[in-house]
Amino acid sequence: MTVSNDGKWIDKKISRRDMLKLTGMGVAGVAIGASGLGGVMKVMGYDVFEPVADSTTAVNKVDFYGKHQSGIITPVQTNIYFASLDVLFTSKKELQELFKQWTPLVVRLMNGELMVDLTKNTRVPTGDTGEADGLDASNLSITIGVGPSLFDKLGIQHLKPEELKDLPHFPKDQLQKEFTGGDLCIQACADDPQVAFHAVRNLVRAASGKVEIKWSQAGFNSFPAGGGSPRNLFAFKDGTVNPSSTDEKDLNKVVWVDKGWLKGGSYLVARKIQMHLETWDRTSLKDQEATFGRYRDSGAPFGKKKEFDDFDVEAKDSNGEYIMPDTSHVHLARKSGARILRRSYSYASGVMTNTGTHDAGLLFISFQKDPAQFTTVQNSLGRMDKMNEYITHRGSAVFACLPGVSKGSYIGEALFNAL
Amino acid sequence: MTVSNDGKWIDKKISRRDMLKLTGMGVAGVAIGASGLGGVMKVMGYDVFEPVADSTTAVNKVDFYGKHQSGIITPVQTNIYFASLDVLFTSKKELQELFKQWTPLVVRLMNGELMVDLTKNTRVPTGDTGEADGLDASNLSITIGVGPSLFDKLGIQHLKPEELKDLPHFPKDQLQKEFTGGDLCIQACADDPQVAFHAVRNLVRAASGKVEIKWSQAGFNSFPAGGGSPRNLFAFKDGTVNPSSTDEKDLNKVVWVDKGWLKGGSYLVARKIQMHLETWDRTSLKDQEATFGRYRDSGAPFGKKKEFDDFDVEAKDSNGEYIMPDTSHVHLARKSGARILRRSYSYASGVMTNTGTHDAGLLFISFQKDPAQFTTVQNSLGRMDKMNEYITHRGSAVFACLPGVSKGSYIGEALFNAL
């Protein structure tokens, strides 16, 4: 929903460009009518009216307000721009100001609106970098998380959930500092790569001098026209066993934190996993399938017909052999007994300059109510997982994704109320 | 168009997955009925029946056969995967074999078919890496070019067109070896990033031991729903002054080579241009617009209303000042008198590890009948161009893109006929 110059609600579907024109006179002092924090704030020297409401007219729009942040159980989009940030400040108050500042900007971005009015005063830097002008909301979701290091940096260790700590070292990890850790994360997912990038760029820019990007990664998913999960760059379907986004009971068991100030939030684990495509491509289909424990064509688990068929990991054939090999990725992951919500994206970033092989792989992202769920799965994979021959973990980070925001509130308010 | 197991044409729209099933028995010896080179060849140990015809039923299909290669005047797609390759052989015969091998594979890729049959013998490496299985043709275009170094490497300098040589050094170039040059290029553009990547991956893989990737770059374009050119990461519209893809006379003047074995081909110039987004974003809109000589909002040239309005670069206002500043990018490019066909893509590849700033920019690609057209434009920009403050050229390459292929022929045949 949006507001015209004379304060009336506009009810037709509008694009970011129309919005630009409609809010053109906003700087002169037209307040946005939704209830909430109220008031006007400065971003890049521009007035931003806060709060703004979820648009009811925007095309391809994901809602911002709700019990949980978007981008967790939101249907997976085609593109991600993931950024891990370090903060340049040391007080909790500045963190609070940052989150208050970001809140209306995130709402606007998810509405497919420009960040701030642009049409006045062309002699100062523009309030929105503009590359998403003319593009619609593109189902943009924005998910903000806080890393373990943030609590140490701000001297608020007493508020750090005990579950929030750096992941342990796993066998075969070859983590690189430049893809690891971070005080904050912004996960921007959208059905357009420029919309996702624009969101991160502008949030970071609005927080200039307060945060800097430690590492970032773009990624994509390509969805088969006929439905089913997207294939990763090993050509296998990924994320099949996720809990259903409509099974609230199951989500409460697997994804949502149910205690403390993080209640309604979730833990995000990000792993930048290089996939050695050339090695994989020299492997027979039979061995590839045995590595996953699934058929490439259908995505079905061994012994089954369809991608989403359930299976008994302990089932054996008439020779007493496991139907799903006990060194397969799916067998070991399932056997761990732990469950996670996978929400990963592929990347293809050119070639490794030293070897000429593809610098490609998976930006693995999972959500869980406790990072220990991921650790349990990963430890189960351990040294046994046949997949280890084909992948190298290059980056790693864990973040506590803040609870959802209700109208009149702001990102992370529960954290500050707990102070 | 495709052929069923009993040799009948299938006339319904089919996806890559259907195709897999239809051609399932192909290995047993069912010949594809189209006329052409004929015969069966081996790729990765698999039989490939050649040639294949452009499908008449594939969804979102760009034609392979024609006077010119696809991907030059083909409507710009949303994604590119560009690869510059070095060859590992030294004879023209091996080059010819490579192009003969690639021809039916390129046709299949552009048809949205799997590269080869996959359903038999799962004990050898698969003939198609499979990640595009289930995705349609996605308007994939594939453009293959030969670089100046290839002619030297194969000892066929006498066939190197005099226009084909490394670009001169330009002021402010900061080229890096790892993004520069190459013996061959594959430009794969599609409306799906995974389809574009899959094409390059599989062509390189099929030529394993014959070529290796020297450098590669993924990119994207996001098209406004309302039409018009996409915006680059400086938020300005790019490629506005291109010749029309339907104006054959103009294309003959600007794009298509009209002599020698390269007749019907075109020269591709690739420049990896880093855009310093943080510096740009600190600049006022007024200065940004003066840098381009266009308005950001509309894309119109200074003094005009609409993106595609023509303009007189020498026009002055009542004070005798140029309406379009004579240090602006568009003024200088236009004043050079040279014209090119721009077909660029944005990239956002994370952050520079040394500075934490965005590693983002433009994979500038232009086509012209002579690389001197590009050189003339670039020299005109020279040290004057206000844009220089905001960009750094990191990579550079030039390729002669081969003429189109007629049925029964193969990629680059004219080159070998000229030997």
Image: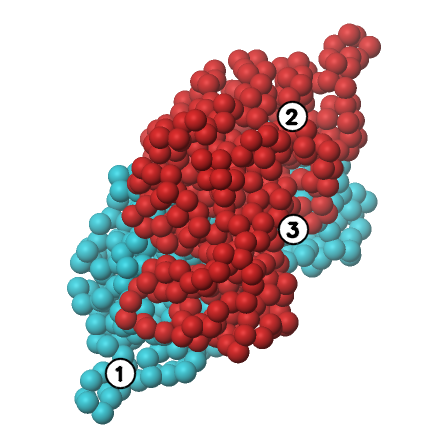
Chain colours: A red, B cyan
The image position of residue A330, as x and y in percent, is 65, 23
The numbered mark at residue B323 is 1
Is the C-beta separation of discs 3 and 2 under 8 Å? no
Q: Are marks 1 and 3 on the same chain?
A: yes
Q: Residue tagged by mark 2?
A: A339
Name above or below for residue A296 compared with residue B355.
above
The quadrant in which residue B128 appears is top right
Separation of residues labelled 1 and 2 (CA atoms): 64 Å
Q: Amino acid at mark 2?
A: Arg
Is the C-beta separation of discs 1 and 3 under 8 Å? no
Chain letter of disc 3? Answer: B
Q: Are marks 3 and 2 on the same chain?
A: no
Q: Is residue B345 visible?
A: yes
Label 3 crowd (10 A; few <14 / some 14-19 / many >=20): many
Chain letter of disc 2? Answer: A
Disc 1 is placed on an element classified as loop
Residue sitting at x 79%, y 43%: B5
Q: Quadrant of the C terminus of chain A?
A: top left
| Left or right side of A413 for A264 | right
The numbered mark at residue B293 is none
Separation of residues labelled 3 and 2 (CA atoms): 33 Å
Name above or below for residue B291 compared with residue B355.
below
Q: Residue tagged by mark 3?
A: B136
